[in-house]
Amino acid sequence: MQAVYIHTWGCQLNEHKSEEIAGVLARAGFRLVERLEEAEIVVFNTCSVREKAVEKVLGKLGEVQRLRSRGREVLLGIGGCLSQAERERLFARAKGVGIDFLFGTSDQDIKRLPELIARARAEPQLVAIGKPEGLDHLPVRRKSPFQAYVTITEGCDHFCSYCIVPYTRGRLRSRPPEEIVAEVEELASQGYKEVTLLGQNVNSYGKDLFGEGRFPELLRQVARTGIPRIRFTSSHPEDMTEDLLRTIASLPNVCEQLHMAAQSGSDRVLKDMRRPYTKAQFLEKVELAKRLIPGVNITTDLIVGYPIETEEDFQETVDLVERARFGSAFIFKFSPRPGTIAAVKYGDPIPRGIKERRHKLLLELQRRISDEESRRLLGQEVEVLVEGHSDGKLFGKGRDGRTVILSGSGDERLLGELIKVRITGVAKGTLLGEMR
């Protein structure tokens, strides 16, 4: 049994894709290991949404090179968005490190991995990257026995100017609802406590199958399985309808957490980004969500330093953050992605120093707001799913997605259990709680 080490970068979709890679290889007789040093085959499942993610992948290649320099024969394969987007340049960018094979993002590419590994030993620099089409049911080796990812869509039809996803993941593809419901029913029967429905734009679900969005109906069907907790990510503001918000509010096992990427607070920048909403429309949806779903935690993505962003545009984003009061935000400095509209049209004209200043200011503002929003929960009783332990303490997440660290010594028998916790403090954006 050949030993395989899998390392993942990027979003939850990528994490789940690595679970499928592990499932395919385990079924084919490979042995999965947790340490790169133990591996005979190394698989990197990559992300290329930001240049920083690409740099992390390239930096990790050095560890493989060091193993080889000590006489260890290691086969190296790279897959995911970086392979899909930069197959021609990747060998050159990884100069000095022998990449043995590349594979893409599609289920078909992953299904063929055992064959690619066998061929790569005889065919150096093997490239086997297909067009992302269709959705296959792949075996899954899940990391958790009580939390599970379930893919409902892949790809995206929006073609935002800065985003590489439609080029690496393909157009929107939705799984049939009966397949999704059957998978969640099976997870519920196995004792899973939580599922996260995944897609680049989950609330666009069904547009390719039915000609219209059917995400609220899918949520109702999944909720009827009885699984205790349902989450979903990521949501596009355009498809965050009142019907969807009322559906979330009506289903007790759908968690009170919404990730809704704003990207900017400037109408001028949003239009150039090809985001089909204004700042006012986004804030209306935030206000509606907070009114219809008590205790909802809205999180977001933001980009600073977009090529046409002026100081006035940036201040509009600052104002958006102050008014929306997100629970948390992923804040990124713009980096041009090869082949995207913004990269071709503008390049990267805003100086690094300006980007870093705006990034720092927005981070500091969001940290203050996150802390203030978390303090609203002091003294309240919340439900926590215990996920793990660190430094002798148990931790988990409330229904709103906030992390809670539990006081006292960690009893591992509580892992995977839903427990009641009283919130007693806030430390660096994390809640502290006592078990009731």
Image: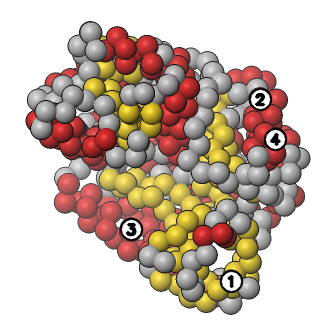
Mark 4 = which residue? Answer: 185
Q: Is residue 24 left or right of residue 85?
A: right
Spatial CA distance of label 2 from label 3 is 41 Å
Mark 2 = which residue? Answer: 179
Q: Which mark is residue 435?
A: 1
| Location of residue 168 (image quadrant) | top left
Circle nearer the N terminus (4, 1):
4
Amino acid residing under circle 2: Glu
Q: Position of residue 312 (x, y in %)?
A: 37, 61
Q: Position of residue 351 (x, y in %)?
A: 19, 53
Q: Is residue 396 left or right of residue 193?
A: left
> Which sits in the foreground, 425 or 344?
425
Residue at the image position 31 percent from the left and 41 percent from the top: 38
> Image quadrant for the C terminus?
bottom right
Tags 2 and 3 in contact by the CB under 8 Å rule? no
Q: Could you tell me if residue 152 is visible in this image?
A: yes
Eye-nearest disc, 4 or 3: 4
Tags 1 and 3 in contact by the CB under 8 Å rule? no
Q: Estimate how packed mark 3 is, as few (under 14), some (14 to 19) or many (20 or more) residues with alpha carbons within 10 Å.
A: many
Circle nearer the N terminus (4, 3):
4
Circle nearer the N terminus (1, 2):
2
Eye-nearest disc, 1 or 2: 1
Mark 3 = which residue? Answer: 362
Tags 4 and 3 in contact by the CB under 8 Å rule? no
Q: Is residue 347 above or below residue 292?
A: above
Amino acid residing under circle 4: Glu
Circle nearer the N terminus (1, 3):
3
Amino acid residing under circle 3: Leu
